[in-house]
Amino acid sequence: MHQPAIPHLAAADPELAQLIEGEAKRQFDKVRLIASENYVSTAVLEATGTVLTNKYSEGYAGKRYYEGQQFVDQIEAMAIERAKALFGVDHANVQTYSGSPANLAVYLALAAPGDTVMGMALPAGGHLTHGWSVSATGKWFRAVQYGVRKDTGRIDLDEVRDLARAERPKLIFCGGTAIPRTIDFPAFAEIAKEVGAVLVADIAHIAGLVAGGAHPSPVGHAQVISTTTHKTLRGPRGAMLMSDAEYAKALDKAVFPGLQGGPHNHTTAAIAVALAEAARPDFREYAANVVANAKALADALLGRGFDLVSGGTDNHLILMDLTSKGIGGKPAAQALDRAGIELNYNTVPFDPRKPFDPSGVRLGTSAITTRGLGVDQMPQVAEWIDRAIAATNDGDDPAIGTIAAEVSEFLSAYPMPGWA
Ligand SMILES: *Cc1c(COP(=O)(O)O)cnc(C)c1O
Protein backbone atom coordinates (compact mmCIF):
# COMPACT_ATOMS: atom_id res chain seq x y z
CA MET A 1 0.00 0.00 0.00
CA HIS A 2 1.11 3.52 -0.81
CA GLN A 3 2.79 5.20 2.13
CA PRO A 4 1.55 7.70 3.33
CA ALA A 5 -1.84 6.06 2.86
CA ILE A 6 -4.32 7.75 0.51
CA PRO A 7 -7.75 6.86 1.97
CA HIS A 8 -9.42 10.17 1.03
CA LEU A 9 -8.27 9.88 -2.54
CA ALA A 10 -9.41 6.26 -2.66
CA ALA A 11 -12.89 7.37 -1.54
CA ALA A 12 -13.11 10.43 -3.78
CA ASP A 13 -11.54 9.03 -6.93
CA PRO A 14 -11.08 5.27 -6.66
CA GLU A 15 -9.98 4.83 -10.26
CA LEU A 16 -7.14 7.31 -9.88
CA ALA A 17 -6.18 5.94 -6.45
CA GLN A 18 -5.93 2.47 -8.00
CA LEU A 19 -3.50 3.75 -10.61
CA ILE A 20 -1.32 5.34 -7.93
CA GLU A 21 -1.36 2.10 -5.92
CA GLY A 22 -0.40 0.28 -9.11
CA GLU A 23 2.55 2.60 -9.67
CA ALA A 24 3.72 2.19 -6.07
CA LYS A 25 3.61 -1.61 -6.42
CA ARG A 26 5.43 -1.38 -9.76
CA GLN A 27 8.19 0.64 -8.09
CA PHE A 28 8.38 -2.00 -5.35
CA ASP A 29 8.60 -4.92 -7.78
CA LYS A 30 11.22 -3.59 -10.20
CA VAL A 31 14.96 -3.13 -10.18
CA ARG A 32 14.85 0.56 -11.03
CA LEU A 33 17.97 1.51 -12.92
CA ILE A 34 16.88 4.76 -14.58
CA ALA A 35 19.84 6.98 -13.76
CA SER A 36 17.79 10.13 -13.14
CA GLU A 37 15.33 8.49 -10.73
CA ASN A 38 15.31 7.64 -7.04
CA TYR A 39 13.00 6.81 -4.15
CA VAL A 40 12.30 9.84 -1.93
CA SER A 41 11.70 9.40 1.78
CA THR A 42 8.22 9.26 3.24
CA ALA A 43 8.96 12.62 4.90
CA VAL A 44 9.60 14.18 1.47
CA LEU A 45 6.39 12.59 0.16
CA GLU A 46 4.45 14.03 3.09
CA ALA A 47 5.81 17.54 2.52
CA THR A 48 4.78 17.46 -1.15
CA GLY A 49 1.24 16.52 -0.18
CA THR A 50 0.53 19.40 2.21
CA VAL A 51 -1.69 22.51 2.17
CA LEU A 52 1.33 24.52 1.03
CA THR A 53 0.03 23.77 -2.46
CA ASN A 54 -2.83 26.21 -1.71
CA LYS A 55 -0.61 29.27 -1.28
CA TYR A 56 0.50 31.90 -3.76
CA SER A 57 3.73 33.73 -2.92
CA GLU A 58 5.17 35.48 -5.96
CA GLY A 59 8.34 37.32 -5.01
CA TYR A 60 10.90 36.51 -2.34
CA ALA A 61 10.79 36.41 1.47
CA GLY A 62 9.95 39.88 2.80
CA LYS A 63 9.05 41.16 -0.70
CA ARG A 64 5.95 39.25 -1.75
CA TYR A 65 3.05 40.32 -3.93
CA TYR A 66 0.46 38.51 -1.79
CA GLU A 67 -0.32 38.62 1.93
CA GLY A 68 -0.28 35.68 4.31
CA GLN A 69 3.37 34.70 3.98
CA GLN A 70 4.02 34.25 7.73
CA PHE A 71 4.90 30.59 7.28
CA VAL A 72 5.90 30.34 3.64
CA ASP A 73 8.63 32.96 4.11
CA GLN A 74 10.13 30.87 6.90
CA ILE A 75 9.87 27.65 4.90
CA GLU A 76 11.58 29.14 1.86
CA ALA A 77 14.28 30.68 4.07
CA MET A 78 14.91 27.26 5.62
CA ALA A 79 15.34 25.66 2.21
CA ILE A 80 17.73 28.44 1.13
CA GLU A 81 19.82 28.26 4.31
CA ARG A 82 20.06 24.47 4.07
CA ALA A 83 21.13 24.63 0.42
CA LYS A 84 23.79 27.25 1.21
CA ALA A 85 25.14 25.22 4.12
CA LEU A 86 25.08 21.85 2.35
CA PHE A 87 26.81 23.01 -0.83
CA GLY A 88 28.84 25.86 0.69
CA VAL A 89 27.55 28.56 -1.65
CA ASP A 90 26.84 32.29 -1.19
CA HIS A 91 23.41 32.22 -2.77
CA ALA A 92 20.61 29.77 -3.53
CA ASN A 93 17.31 30.15 -5.35
CA VAL A 94 14.93 27.28 -4.59
CA GLN A 95 11.93 28.43 -6.66
CA THR A 96 12.83 27.07 -10.10
CA TYR A 97 10.17 24.60 -11.21
CA SER A 98 12.55 21.99 -12.62
CA GLY A 99 15.98 21.59 -14.18
CA SER A 100 15.06 22.84 -17.64
CA PRO A 101 13.44 26.13 -16.52
CA ALA A 102 16.31 26.61 -14.06
CA ASN A 103 18.74 26.52 -16.96
CA LEU A 104 16.54 28.84 -18.99
CA ALA A 105 16.73 31.31 -16.08
CA VAL A 106 20.53 31.19 -16.31
CA TYR A 107 20.37 32.20 -19.99
CA LEU A 108 17.86 34.95 -19.22
CA ALA A 109 20.08 36.28 -16.41
CA LEU A 110 23.43 36.19 -18.16
CA ALA A 111 22.99 36.20 -21.94
CA ALA A 112 20.91 37.86 -24.66
CA PRO A 113 19.23 36.13 -27.59
CA GLY A 114 21.74 35.49 -30.35
CA ASP A 115 24.71 35.36 -27.98
CA THR A 116 27.16 32.51 -28.35
CA VAL A 117 26.85 29.82 -25.69
CA MET A 118 28.65 26.53 -25.34
CA GLY A 119 27.64 23.16 -23.96
CA MET A 120 28.01 19.45 -24.44
CA ALA A 121 26.14 18.00 -27.41
CA LEU A 122 23.11 15.91 -26.47
CA PRO A 123 24.28 12.77 -28.32
CA ALA A 124 27.60 12.96 -26.46
CA GLY A 125 25.88 13.07 -23.05
CA GLY A 126 24.87 16.73 -22.64
CA HIS A 127 21.37 18.02 -21.88
CA LEU A 128 18.85 19.53 -24.32
CA THR A 129 19.07 22.85 -22.47
CA HIS A 130 22.81 23.14 -23.07
CA GLY A 131 22.09 24.48 -26.56
CA TRP A 132 20.82 21.45 -28.47
CA SER A 133 19.08 22.44 -31.72
CA VAL A 134 15.50 21.40 -30.85
CA SER A 135 15.61 23.21 -27.48
CA ALA A 136 14.70 26.89 -27.07
CA THR A 137 18.30 27.31 -25.94
CA GLY A 138 19.52 26.08 -29.34
CA LYS A 139 16.98 28.16 -31.26
CA TRP A 140 17.40 31.48 -29.42
CA PHE A 141 21.15 31.39 -28.87
CA ARG A 142 24.10 30.65 -31.09
CA ALA A 143 25.10 27.38 -29.51
CA VAL A 144 28.41 25.66 -30.13
CA GLN A 145 28.81 22.14 -28.85
CA TYR A 146 31.64 19.96 -27.64
CA GLY A 147 31.65 16.18 -27.38
CA VAL A 148 33.78 13.27 -26.28
CA ARG A 149 36.77 11.57 -27.88
CA LYS A 150 35.95 8.54 -29.99
CA ASP A 151 38.83 6.48 -28.56
CA THR A 152 38.21 7.21 -24.86
CA GLY A 153 34.52 8.16 -24.63
CA ARG A 154 35.65 11.04 -22.43
CA ILE A 155 35.44 14.82 -22.78
CA ASP A 156 38.41 16.18 -24.67
CA LEU A 157 39.37 19.33 -22.76
CA ASP A 158 41.76 20.38 -25.54
CA GLU A 159 38.79 20.41 -27.92
CA VAL A 160 36.75 22.40 -25.37
CA ARG A 161 39.57 24.94 -25.04
CA ASP A 162 40.07 25.29 -28.80
CA LEU A 163 36.35 25.73 -29.36
CA ALA A 164 36.06 28.28 -26.55
CA ARG A 165 39.03 30.28 -27.90
CA ALA A 166 37.58 30.30 -31.41
CA GLU A 167 33.95 31.05 -30.46
CA ARG A 168 34.29 33.20 -27.29
CA PRO A 169 31.01 32.00 -25.70
CA LYS A 170 29.31 34.05 -23.00
CA LEU A 171 28.33 30.93 -21.07
CA ILE A 172 29.97 27.53 -20.87
CA PHE A 173 27.88 24.67 -19.52
CA CYS A 174 29.53 21.58 -18.07
CA GLY A 175 27.73 18.51 -16.78
CA GLY A 176 25.16 16.35 -18.54
CA THR A 177 22.76 13.45 -18.55
CA ALA A 178 24.87 10.53 -19.70
CA ILE A 179 28.40 11.24 -18.49
CA PRO A 180 29.81 8.25 -16.57
CA ARG A 181 33.01 10.06 -15.61
CA THR A 182 34.07 12.77 -13.14
CA ILE A 183 33.57 16.33 -14.39
CA ASP A 184 36.84 18.25 -14.22
CA PHE A 185 35.48 21.54 -12.84
CA PRO A 186 38.91 23.21 -12.34
CA ALA A 187 39.84 22.55 -15.98
CA PHE A 188 36.52 23.96 -17.24
CA ALA A 189 36.98 26.98 -14.93
CA GLU A 190 40.41 27.69 -16.37
CA ILE A 191 39.02 27.61 -19.93
CA ALA A 192 36.05 29.83 -19.01
CA LYS A 193 38.36 32.32 -17.32
CA GLU A 194 40.68 32.47 -20.29
CA VAL A 195 37.86 33.35 -22.72
CA GLY A 196 35.86 35.52 -20.32
CA ALA A 197 32.88 33.17 -20.10
CA VAL A 198 30.71 32.41 -17.09
CA LEU A 199 31.02 28.74 -16.16
CA VAL A 200 27.71 27.06 -15.37
CA ALA A 201 28.01 23.66 -13.69
CA ASP A 202 24.81 21.69 -14.27
CA ILE A 203 25.02 19.05 -11.55
CA ALA A 204 21.43 17.79 -12.00
CA HIS A 205 22.58 14.17 -12.07
CA ILE A 206 25.38 14.26 -9.53
CA ALA A 207 24.11 16.77 -6.92
CA GLY A 208 23.64 14.03 -4.33
CA LEU A 209 27.14 12.73 -4.96
CA VAL A 210 28.54 16.25 -4.60
CA ALA A 211 26.56 16.83 -1.38
CA GLY A 212 27.67 13.46 -0.04
CA GLY A 213 31.34 13.95 -0.91
CA ALA A 214 31.42 11.28 -3.64
CA HIS A 215 32.10 13.67 -6.53
CA PRO A 216 34.25 16.84 -6.47
CA SER A 217 32.27 20.04 -5.91
CA PRO A 218 32.02 22.78 -8.54
CA VAL A 219 31.96 25.43 -5.78
CA GLY A 220 34.89 27.79 -6.19
CA HIS A 221 35.18 26.86 -9.89
CA ALA A 222 31.78 27.53 -11.47
CA GLN A 223 30.17 30.92 -10.85
CA VAL A 224 26.72 29.43 -11.36
CA ILE A 225 25.51 25.96 -10.34
CA SER A 226 22.27 24.54 -11.61
CA THR A 227 20.73 21.37 -10.26
CA THR A 228 17.57 19.35 -10.12
CA THR A 229 16.58 18.13 -6.68
CA HIS A 230 15.08 14.75 -7.63
CA LYS A 231 17.96 12.70 -9.03
CA THR A 232 20.85 11.59 -6.79
CA LEU A 233 19.92 14.36 -4.32
CA ARG A 234 16.77 12.34 -3.56
CA GLY A 235 14.32 15.19 -3.11
CA PRO A 236 11.05 16.15 -4.80
CA ARG A 237 10.86 17.05 -8.48
CA GLY A 238 12.31 20.53 -8.53
CA ALA A 239 15.50 22.47 -9.02
CA MET A 240 17.83 25.06 -7.52
CA LEU A 241 20.23 27.67 -8.79
CA MET A 242 23.28 28.44 -6.68
CA SER A 243 25.95 31.05 -7.26
CA ASP A 244 28.57 33.46 -6.08
CA ALA A 245 27.08 36.59 -4.46
CA GLU A 246 27.85 38.54 -7.63
CA TYR A 247 25.21 36.70 -9.68
CA ALA A 248 22.54 36.39 -6.96
CA LYS A 249 20.37 39.33 -8.00
CA ALA A 250 20.44 38.58 -11.72
CA LEU A 251 19.48 34.94 -11.17
CA ASP A 252 16.67 35.77 -8.74
CA LYS A 253 15.24 38.35 -11.14
CA ALA A 254 15.44 35.90 -14.01
CA VAL A 255 13.50 33.24 -12.08
CA PHE A 256 10.90 35.76 -10.90
CA PRO A 257 9.57 37.88 -12.52
CA GLY A 258 11.59 36.93 -15.59
CA LEU A 259 10.39 33.42 -16.18
CA GLN A 260 8.03 32.15 -13.51
CA GLY A 261 5.02 33.08 -11.45
CA GLY A 262 4.25 31.70 -8.00
CA PRO A 263 6.71 29.25 -6.51
CA HIS A 264 5.52 25.72 -5.70
CA ASN A 265 5.65 25.99 -1.93
CA HIS A 266 4.91 22.33 -1.26
CA THR A 267 7.95 21.50 -3.39
CA THR A 268 10.06 24.12 -1.59
CA ALA A 269 9.19 22.47 1.74
CA ALA A 270 10.04 19.03 0.38
CA ILE A 271 13.36 20.39 -0.93
CA ALA A 272 14.09 21.68 2.59
CA VAL A 273 13.37 18.20 3.98
CA ALA A 274 15.60 16.52 1.39
CA LEU A 275 18.44 18.99 2.05
CA ALA A 276 18.31 18.22 5.77
CA GLU A 277 18.42 14.50 4.96
CA ALA A 278 21.38 15.05 2.65
CA ALA A 279 23.28 16.85 5.41
CA ARG A 280 23.17 13.79 7.68
CA PRO A 281 26.16 11.45 7.98
CA ASP A 282 24.16 8.50 6.58
CA PHE A 283 23.73 10.40 3.31
CA ARG A 284 27.53 10.49 2.89
CA GLU A 285 27.43 6.74 3.26
CA TYR A 286 24.58 6.58 0.72
CA ALA A 287 26.54 8.62 -1.83
CA ALA A 288 29.63 6.41 -1.40
CA ASN A 289 27.47 3.29 -1.77
CA VAL A 290 25.86 4.62 -4.96
CA VAL A 291 29.30 4.93 -6.55
CA ALA A 292 30.53 1.59 -5.15
CA ASN A 293 27.42 -0.12 -6.53
CA ALA A 294 27.87 1.49 -9.95
CA LYS A 295 31.49 0.31 -10.08
CA ALA A 296 30.51 -3.20 -8.97
CA LEU A 297 27.71 -3.35 -11.53
CA ALA A 298 30.04 -2.04 -14.25
CA ASP A 299 32.63 -4.70 -13.37
CA ALA A 300 30.01 -7.45 -13.43
CA LEU A 301 28.71 -6.27 -16.82
CA LEU A 302 32.25 -6.04 -18.24
CA GLY A 303 32.83 -9.57 -16.98
CA ARG A 304 29.85 -10.68 -19.07
CA GLY A 305 31.26 -9.08 -22.20
CA PHE A 306 29.21 -5.89 -22.21
CA ASP A 307 30.76 -2.85 -23.83
CA LEU A 308 30.69 0.23 -21.57
CA VAL A 309 31.26 3.75 -22.90
CA SER A 310 34.59 4.98 -21.47
CA GLY A 311 35.17 1.46 -20.10
CA GLY A 312 33.43 1.97 -16.76
CA THR A 313 32.18 4.63 -14.37
CA ASP A 314 33.29 7.11 -11.70
CA ASN A 315 29.79 8.04 -10.55
CA HIS A 316 26.25 6.58 -10.39
CA LEU A 317 25.86 6.10 -14.13
CA ILE A 318 26.74 3.47 -16.72
CA LEU A 319 26.32 3.91 -20.47
CA MET A 320 26.32 0.60 -22.31
CA ASP A 321 26.74 0.05 -26.06
CA LEU A 322 24.82 -3.11 -27.04
CA THR A 323 26.11 -3.34 -30.62
CA SER A 324 28.39 -6.28 -29.79
CA LYS A 325 25.42 -8.13 -28.24
CA GLY A 326 23.51 -7.92 -31.51
CA ILE A 327 20.55 -5.97 -30.12
CA GLY A 328 19.43 -2.33 -30.22
CA GLY A 329 18.93 -0.26 -27.08
CA LYS A 330 15.18 0.01 -27.50
CA PRO A 331 14.26 -3.69 -27.88
CA ALA A 332 16.69 -4.43 -25.03
CA ALA A 333 15.12 -1.80 -22.74
CA GLN A 334 11.62 -3.07 -23.56
CA ALA A 335 12.56 -6.70 -22.86
CA LEU A 336 14.33 -5.74 -19.64
CA ASP A 337 11.26 -3.85 -18.49
CA ARG A 338 9.21 -7.02 -18.95
CA ALA A 339 11.91 -8.86 -16.99
CA GLY A 340 11.45 -6.44 -14.07
CA ILE A 341 14.51 -4.34 -14.80
CA GLU A 342 13.75 -0.73 -15.66
CA LEU A 343 16.19 1.43 -17.58
CA ASN A 344 16.16 3.68 -20.65
CA TYR A 345 17.47 3.29 -24.16
CA ASN A 346 20.08 5.92 -24.94
CA THR A 347 22.32 7.04 -27.75
CA VAL A 348 26.01 6.33 -27.31
CA PRO A 349 28.66 8.79 -28.56
CA PHE A 350 29.02 8.59 -32.38
CA ASP A 351 25.90 6.43 -32.50
CA PRO A 352 25.20 5.28 -36.08
CA ARG A 353 21.54 4.67 -35.14
CA LYS A 354 18.74 7.19 -34.54
CA PRO A 355 17.91 8.67 -31.08
CA PHE A 356 14.52 6.89 -31.06
CA ASP A 357 16.21 3.56 -31.82
CA PRO A 358 19.76 3.95 -30.54
CA SER A 359 22.60 1.52 -29.81
CA GLY A 360 22.75 1.81 -26.06
CA VAL A 361 21.08 1.78 -22.69
CA ARG A 362 21.77 3.94 -19.64
CA LEU A 363 21.79 2.56 -16.10
CA GLY A 364 22.15 4.19 -12.70
CA THR A 365 22.41 2.93 -9.14
CA SER A 366 20.80 5.81 -7.15
CA ALA A 367 17.41 4.14 -6.67
CA ILE A 368 18.58 0.59 -5.96
CA THR A 369 21.08 1.92 -3.42
CA THR A 370 18.27 3.75 -1.60
CA ARG A 371 16.44 0.44 -1.64
CA GLY A 372 19.35 -1.13 0.24
CA LEU A 373 21.06 -3.19 -2.46
CA GLY A 374 24.83 -3.35 -2.05
CA VAL A 375 27.90 -4.43 -4.00
CA ASP A 376 27.20 -8.09 -3.21
CA GLN A 377 23.92 -7.90 -5.11
CA MET A 378 25.35 -6.28 -8.26
CA PRO A 379 26.55 -9.53 -9.91
CA GLN A 380 22.96 -10.82 -9.63
CA VAL A 381 21.61 -7.67 -11.31
CA ALA A 382 24.16 -8.06 -14.12
CA GLU A 383 23.23 -11.73 -14.50
CA TRP A 384 19.54 -10.85 -14.95
CA ILE A 385 20.42 -8.21 -17.55
CA ASP A 386 22.63 -10.65 -19.43
CA ARG A 387 20.05 -13.45 -19.31
CA ALA A 388 17.17 -11.18 -20.38
CA ILE A 389 19.12 -9.90 -23.38
CA ALA A 390 20.16 -13.43 -24.39
CA ALA A 391 16.54 -14.60 -24.01
CA THR A 392 15.36 -11.72 -26.23
CA ASN A 393 17.90 -12.60 -28.89
CA ASP A 394 16.71 -16.24 -28.71
CA GLY A 395 13.02 -15.24 -28.80
CA ASP A 396 12.60 -17.09 -25.49
CA ASP A 397 9.67 -15.19 -23.94
CA PRO A 398 9.04 -17.57 -21.02
CA ALA A 399 12.60 -16.93 -19.81
CA ILE A 400 11.75 -13.21 -19.50
CA GLY A 401 8.78 -14.07 -17.29
CA THR A 402 10.99 -16.30 -15.14
CA ILE A 403 13.42 -13.42 -14.56
CA ALA A 404 10.58 -11.02 -13.64
CA ALA A 405 9.39 -13.50 -11.01
CA GLU A 406 12.92 -13.90 -9.62
CA VAL A 407 13.36 -10.11 -9.48
CA SER A 408 10.08 -9.55 -7.67
CA GLU A 409 10.81 -12.33 -5.17
CA PHE A 410 14.33 -10.95 -4.56
CA LEU A 411 13.13 -7.35 -4.05
CA SER A 412 10.48 -8.33 -1.51
CA ALA A 413 13.34 -8.41 1.05
CA TYR A 414 14.25 -4.74 0.40
CA PRO A 415 11.89 -2.13 1.88
CA MET A 416 10.83 0.80 -0.24
CA PRO A 417 10.05 4.28 1.15
CA GLY A 418 6.56 5.07 -0.14
CA TRP A 419 5.31 1.49 0.15
CA ALA A 420 4.23 -0.46 3.20
C1 LIG B 1 17.63 16.14 -15.72
C2 LIG B 1 18.49 17.23 -16.22
C3 LIG B 1 18.00 18.51 -16.49
C4 LIG B 1 16.53 18.82 -16.57
O1 LIG B 1 15.77 18.56 -15.52
P1 LIG B 1 14.16 18.48 -15.65
O2 LIG B 1 13.75 18.60 -14.25
O3 LIG B 1 13.88 17.16 -16.30
O4 LIG B 1 13.72 19.62 -16.50
C5 LIG B 1 18.89 19.51 -16.82
N1 LIG B 1 20.20 19.26 -16.91
C6 LIG B 1 20.72 18.04 -16.70
C7 LIG B 1 22.18 17.83 -16.81
C8 LIG B 1 19.88 16.98 -16.35
O5 LIG B 1 20.41 15.77 -16.17
Image: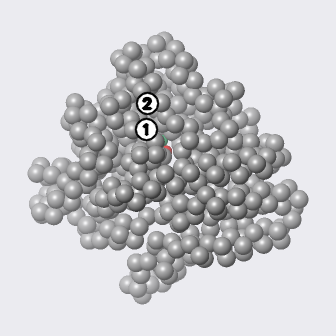
Res. 362 visible in picture? no
Q: Examine the rendered structure and indicate whether residue 24 appears above or below residue 237.
A: below
* Residue at image mark 1: 216
Tell whether 401 sits left or right of 44.
Answer: right
Q: Examine the rendered structure and indicate whether residue 291 appears above or below residue 418.
A: above
- The image quadrant of residue 324 is top right
Tell whether 298 sits left or right of 139.
Answer: right
**Crowding near the residue tagged with mark 1, few <14, some 14–19, many ≥20 C-alpha atoms within 10 Å:** some
Amino acid bearing label 2: Phe
Q: Is mark 1 within 8 Å of ligand 1?
A: no
Amino acid bearing label 1: Pro
Tell me, yes or no, whether the two marked residues, 2 and 1, touch with CB atoms within 8 Å: yes
- Give residue 185's mark: 2
Q: Percent from the top left, x then y, of residue 318? A: 62, 46
> Colour scheme of this structure image?
one colour
Furthest-bottom residue in this view: 11
Query: In front: 398, or 144?
Result: 398
Q: Percent from the top left, x then y, of residue 302? A: 73, 46
Q: Which residue is located at x 56 percent, y 69 percent?
A: 27
- Give residue 56's mark: none
Q: Which residue is located at x 40 percent, y 71 percent?
A: 42
Q: Nearer the viewer, mark 2 or mark 1?
A: 1
Q: Which residue is located at x 36 percent, y 19 percent?
A: 193
Tell whether 277 sits left or right of 166.
Answer: left
- The image quadrant of residue 255 is top left
Q: Percent from the top left, x then y, of residue 384? A: 74, 62
